[in-house]
Amino acid sequence: MTRGAEVERRGDRTAAAERHHVRRRSPVLVLGLPRDPAGPRHVAGFLAVTVLTVLVTRGALALTGFPQLGGGGLHIAHVLWGGLLMAVAVVGVLSWAGPVVRPLAALVGGIGFGLFIDEIGKFVTSDNDYFYEPTASLIYVVVVVLVLVGEAIHGRRRDPHETLAAAADLAVAGLAGGFSSRARRQARELVDGAGDVRGAAEVRALLDVVEDDARELPDPISAVSRAVVTASRRVARVRWLPRLTVGLLAVVTVYTVVRATVLVATGADLPWWAMVGLLASGAASLVCSLVGLRLVGRDRRRGYEWFRRAVLVNLLLSQIFLFRIDQWSAVTGLVVDLVLLGVVAAELDVLRGRSGADDLARDAAEDTAPAR
């Protein structure tokens, strides 16, 4: 066999291997839809801003006596401002290439969606009742469904080609405006994480020619994420944290059940399914907490995984029923659950050695370091 024939044969084998690997990729990836590694943070930020917008809007309207903008038979509802802000976010994402615009789009879109979903009571009632009692539960169900959708999208393990595509995505912004030290480090880590897939060497060479530029567009979602991770990981080092976690979970669960029982005993008109659901989910959360407390002494990671399950039961189930029964108690419980989830997730990040939290903590250190 001649040398040229051998080279051609190797090329054919390489091409066949590439075609086989392409066939093994997920259908979404084959269609050219790689996931953004920062996507979970953007989705979480979007939903957090949505919930905060609803709370601020309802609180401001209650304090000001529910004023109406308009006159002469016209009423400019805030759902219209919400739609406008969501349109601005979509136009921004469609207009600018690269990842820089996405955090701002998540922020603006979250405010817009919050203003939109706050008026859901008007959309599901024949008399356009903004004060429809199940409104809070409906809003929370929508948020929970979006959380589950985000988890379904980003929960799978990433393909190396997706990781490489994310590095190339960062290069798009770098070619236009240069790389800060943080952006360059993130891009190089993504290329290294992709391994030796086709195109990795070319993307690595592309990153090397991007100029240095410390200026960055503000990213409020990442800034808050870094602050939360840093604070949570400091708290997670406390030795008595497991007992405190279980104690808070127990207090929240017992208070929720007692509050609902009192409302029923005083003759409040509450649906039976909300009470049954609240009692069942509260019991499930308490059982998960106790299992975690039993395990955490000999296997800290497994114990905290059970704590995480307990908090998620509260967030994804108990809060739905509580918002139907008592909205203000639900808001308090929601805040406590979110704080607990942040602390538990931070400890799990440490125990698992996940790099995502390390990156955020390192970014926070870079942000607070004195400029040279």
Image: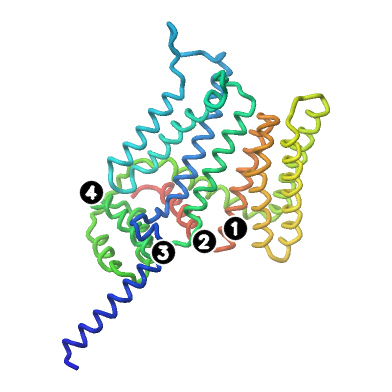
Which residue is denoted by mark 2 in the rendering? 354
User: Where is 270 relative to 282, above or below?
Assistant: above
Which residue is denoted by mark 3 in the rendering? 159
> Most extreme residue toward the top, as rendered?
72
Q: What residue type is labelled 2?
A: Arg
Q: How far apart are marks 1 and 3 (CA)?
A: 23 Å
Q: Where is residue 54 in the image (x, y as percent from the top left)?
A: 53, 29
Nearer to me, 179 or 327: 327
User: Upstream in the sequence, badge 1 or badge 2?
Assistant: 1
Say few, some or many: other residues with alpha carbon within 10 Å of mark 3 (under 14 / 14 to 19 / 20 or more). Answer: some
Q: Distance between the residues labelled 3 and 2?
A: 17 Å
Q: CB under 8 Å between callouts 4 and 2?
A: no
Q: CB under 8 Å between callouts 1 and 2?
A: yes
With 360 as the anchor, is 321 left or right in this view? right
Say few, some or many: other residues with alpha carbon within 10 Å of mark 1 (under 14 / 14 to 19 / 20 or more). Answer: many
Q: Which amino acid does label 1 sit on?
A: Leu
Secondary structure of the residue carrying tag 2 is loop
Which residue is denoted by mark 4 in the rendering? 176
User: Upstream in the sequence, badge 4 or badge 2?
Assistant: 4
Which residue is denoted by mark 1 in the rendering? 348
Query: Mark 3 or mark 2: which is in front?
Result: 3
User: Where is 360 relative to 49, above or below?
Assistant: below
Query: Mark 1 or mark 3: which is in front?
Result: 3
Q: Position of residue 86 (x, y in %)?
A: 40, 33
User: Upstream in the sequence, badge 3 or badge 4?
Assistant: 3
User: Upstream in the sequence, badge 4 or badge 1?
Assistant: 4
Residue drawn at x 58%, y 49% as measured from the top left: 232
Q: What residue type is labelled 4?
A: Ala
